[in-house]
Amino acid sequence: SKMLQPFPNQEFVDACQQLEVENTDGFEFFTESHDVRIFRQYNSTSGLYKYKIYGFLHGATPELCAQVYRDLDYRRTWDSYVNELKVLLQEGDDREVVRWTGRH
């Protein structure tokens, strides 16, 4: 079976630095709700968007956020942008590749 590759170290470092200083260069504002702002960047080659999210989820622990986002059945009930969620590859209990297609 195919091994899931972790993010390259530099990508992780760059993402952590953006927690201190937002960088939305090349991204357009998409939506905002409850102190969370979402930006997106269109890739004309793939026809897909890359997203950046900045904000605070008051009262939500990182563990709770991970649980809510990874529970695909539950996510279908609250994420109005979801068109399809499908696990493409799973490795153990904590690593998976999910195809998320959204409504436009």
Image: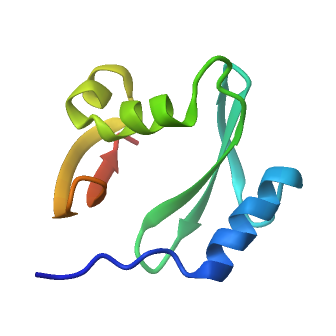
Q: How is the image coloured?
A: rainbow
Along the line of sight, which residue is nearer the eye, 103 or 53? 53
Q: In this view, does 71 lie to the left or right of 68?
A: left
Which of 21 and 94 lies nearest the eye of the viewer?
94
Depicted 29 relative to depicted 75: above or below: below
Q: Position of residue 88 (x, y in %)?
A: 17, 63
Residue 43 place in picture, x, y as percent = 52, 72
Left or right of residue 11: residue 100: left
Tell me if residue 57 can be seen: yes
Task: Specify whether residue 24 is in view.
Answer: no
Q: Give the answer, above or below, for where 2 lies relative to 27.
A: below
Q: Residue at x 44, y 39 (%)?
A: 66
Q: Is residue 62 above or below residue 19?
A: above
Res 41 → quadrant:
bottom right
Q: Which residue lies furthest to the left in this view?
A: 1
Location of residue 19 in the rendering, given as x and y in whole percent from the top left corner: 79, 52
Quadrant of the rendering where the C terminus is positioned: top left
Q: In which quarter of the image is residue 17?
A: bottom right
Q: In the displayed structure, would residue 80 be above or below residue 1?
A: above
Write the residue at 87% across / 52% down.
20
Residue at point 38%, 26% (across, down): 80
Along the viewing direction, whichever of 68 and 35 lies nearer the viewer = 68
- Residue 79 falls left or right of residue 15: left
User: At 40% across and 75% down in the image, what residue appears?
Assistant: 46
Q: Percent position (x, y) of residue 47? A: 42, 68
Count every numbered label the image shows and give the total.
Answer: 0
Which image quarter is the N terminus in?
bottom left
